[in-house]
Image (spheres, rainbow, N blue to C red):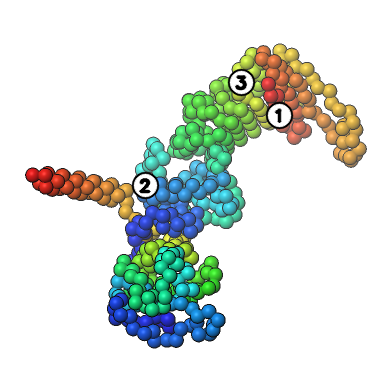
Amino acid sequence: MSSTEQGTSSAAPAEPTTAPESAAAPEVPESFYYVHGKDKVVHKVSAGALQHSALIHGMISNLGYTEEQAKANPFPFENIDGDILQMVVDWCNQHKGKPTPPEDTNLPKQKEKLFDLVLAVNYLEIKELLTYCCKQVAMMVKGKSPEEIREIWMIPTDAEDEAAEKEAKKRAGKEAAGETAAAAGDAK
Amino acid sequence: MSEQRFPFRRLPDDICLKVLKTTDYCEMAGYSLVSKKAHSMVKSLRVPITRGKILVASSMEIRLITNDLREIDFNFKVPENDGEMTSLNDLPVRVDVSMKKNLTDWRGDKHLYVINQSFDEPSEKDIMYAENVLRVFLPLVETVQLNCVTLRKHFFVQHIGMANLKRLDLKSDHNVKFDDLLTLNVEKLIINKAKNISLRDLNRFFKLWMKGSFPKLKFLYVKEKTRTIPDWNVLLKGLKAKEEEKEMEELEEDEEEEEEEPYVDTERKFKIKNCRGVWAELTIDHYLNHKCLVSLYIFNS
């Protein structure tokens, strides 16, 4: 949380509450960037921590923002919940400049949030964290029987799969019919 | 249990595959049994299986050995009230999957071992299980080992005879007639503990080979128990076999090494030729513990 600020809006982020971590390294001052999720809470993250995310790292290197510009334009991730983004930012800060150990226990093991976390991490392209999340998902079914795996991972049966496919086909057919009707109406 | 629920299938496909790659082979195999889609997903991972083994006992068991020598066991529980099984699709009423870290034995480089572990006479149900397994896997494998597996009258000729096998290993010729073996199209045929095959049968087999039958055959090995010293003339009759001379130097060396227990060399080697001009080495031997063996090694034409 140290490098995170609980801002109010993406347009005017408040000053960070804590001193920058780069103070200890006087030679090259560390640059900081700002990100916000669905809840618009702005998180301040160092460039070093953002190295983990291939997506953000690519954006940073292409943009070449100054400190002021970065502050004024936080990266918006509207498809990621605020608390999930917070988790990701925390993880990136904890592993800044460090190689990720194979067994990482720093991430909170909240099963209900794991799904959103996996999607967010996949979107942000944080390879190490994604591997760890996948391990977490895999651990859920360790030593379980096929029926238990079905229950834990909510796998539909073949009959349910077939029914869903039929429904999807029907819906697609209806949509296609609607589109052709609309196109015919436009032509008239 | 409800706390742990996770909508796995809502993840993107590449992430699903990544998760599956992270799981142990045991969970991977268990997941493949959950649904057809799950099965195709696991199949797309192309996990290398080095060996496998199907056990036909009170319940069906399939063991797979992966590349890292880990063993996955599938135990198929068949319903007690309705034991009739007409296809493998009828099998899994309940499947137990377990994993052992030690090495034992099935299908990888396309080997199929069917082993009857019971000492009792197999029941009709056991025979049917074994035949179903063979029917499914015979077209896929190159090597088959049948260990005390009883088959019904016409099954051997209809299915094993039709299969294009590289090697057929019969641990016994239980319920397999010698005439059935004549229909085989294998490269290597090994029969241990032969009971129903006589030297006269083998003589007939070699005569057929000399006339051009079994063009694919490269090696034949038959071992059987005998209480009397076999009359090799019965085997060699009409084969025009030329006996090979033994190398005396080797024999002398052997005698020097084993002075206390004199070694009785009963092995004899012959050469026979077929109508295509292909030579084969016929080896016959008789052990003191009442076993005799006959092998035919065919040289490359």
Q: Quadrant of residue B206?
A: top right
Q: For the residues marked 2 and 1, what is the alpha-carbon distance in whole angstroms?
A: 49 Å
Q: Verify CB contact (< 8 Å) between mark 2 and mark 1.
A: no
**How far apart are the two marked residues, 3 and 2, measured between alpha carbons?**
43 Å
Q: In x, y percent, where is residue B123?
A: 47, 37
Q: Secondary structure at mark 3?
A: loop
Q: Which residue is mark 2?
A: B36
Residue furthest to the left: A188
> Circle 1 marks a residue in which chain?
B
In this view, the residue in front, A162 or A130, is A130
* Label 3 with label 1: CB-CB less than 8 Å: no
Instruction: Name above or below for residue B33 compared with residue B230.
Output: below
The kind of residue on which mark 2 rests is Lys
Alpha carbon of mark 3 to alpha carbon of mark 1: how far?
22 Å
Residue B227 pos. (x, y %): 72, 29
- Could you tell whether B252 is left or right of A176 in the image? right
Q: Chain of mark 3?
A: B
* Observer-nearest of A48 and B214: A48
Query: Dot 3 corresponds to which residue?
Result: B215
The answer to whether dots 3 and 1 both sit on one chain is yes
Secondary structure, mark 1, is strand
Crowd tier of the residue under label 3, counting other residues whose Cα lies within 10 Å: few below 14, some 14–19, many 20 or above: few
Q: Provide residue A78's location: percent of width, then percent of height.
A: 30, 68
Residue type highlighted by circle 3:
Pro
**Residue occupying the point 61% across, 28% down:** B187
